[in-house]
Amino acid sequence: MVAGDERRRMGQTVRFQETLRRLAMIDEGFVEDEAGLGLEPAAALALDLRTAALLRVAVSVAIGSPGVCLEWSVGRALAAGASEDEIADVLLAIAPVAGLGRICLRRSRHGDRARL
């Protein structure tokens, strides 16, 4: 009986660690399947995907999301067709409301573009 309990606890630990790993890397399929959270905008939106993705960037900044979430949002916006200029404009547009402290830009490795 003790061995069975120990195996069950080890299985729970492995599942817990795998869940944390997949959440940390923002495994979209995992989040959608396991948590039932759809990461895509609803099909009935009046907004196009690019606009919805830009709004996600703004909301991520406004609620103080961690850097990895901001980078994910920016990546999704770029994939949806938003330009870097549009993302920068979104950040500038929300700065007076979100506060400059939430809009943290750092230079890319190449030094030519600002990134979240």
Image (cartoon, helix red, strand yellow):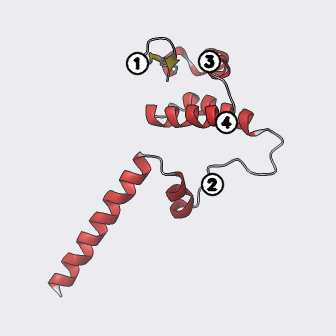
Closer to the N terminus: mark 2 or mark 3?
2
Q: Secondary structure at mark 4?
A: helix
State the CA–CA distance, disc 4 to disc 1.
25 Å
From the viewer's perspective, tell me whether residue 65 is left or right of residue 85: left
Closer to the N terminus: mark 3 or mark 1?
3
- What residue lies at 52% left-to-right and 56% top-to-bottom? 31
Closer to the N terminus: mark 3 or mark 4?
4
Closer to the N terminus: mark 4 or mark 1?
4
State the CA–CA distance, disc 1 to disc 2.
33 Å
Q: Secondary structure at mark 2?
A: loop
Q: Which mark is residue 88?
A: 3
Q: Which residue is mark 1?
A: 109
Q: Which residue is mark 4?
A: 53
Looking at the image, the residue that sits furthest to the front is 110
Residue 29 versus residue 71 in the image, above or below: below
Closer to the eye: label 1 or 2: 1
Residue 19 versus residue 45 in the image, above or below: below
State the CA–CA distance, disc 2 to disc 3.
26 Å
> Do labels 2 and 3 touch, CB within 8 Å?
no
Closer to the N terminus: mark 4 or mark 2?
2
- Horizontal and vertical percent for residue 11? 28, 71
Q: Which mark is residue 38?
A: 2
- Horizontal and vertical percent for residue 26? 47, 47
- What residue lies at 66% left-to-right and 21% top-to-bottom? 90
Which amino acid, mark 2? Answer: Gly
Q: Residues within 10 Å of mark 3 (few under 14, many from 20)?
A: some
From the viewer's perspective, tell me whether residue 34 is left or right of residue 9: right
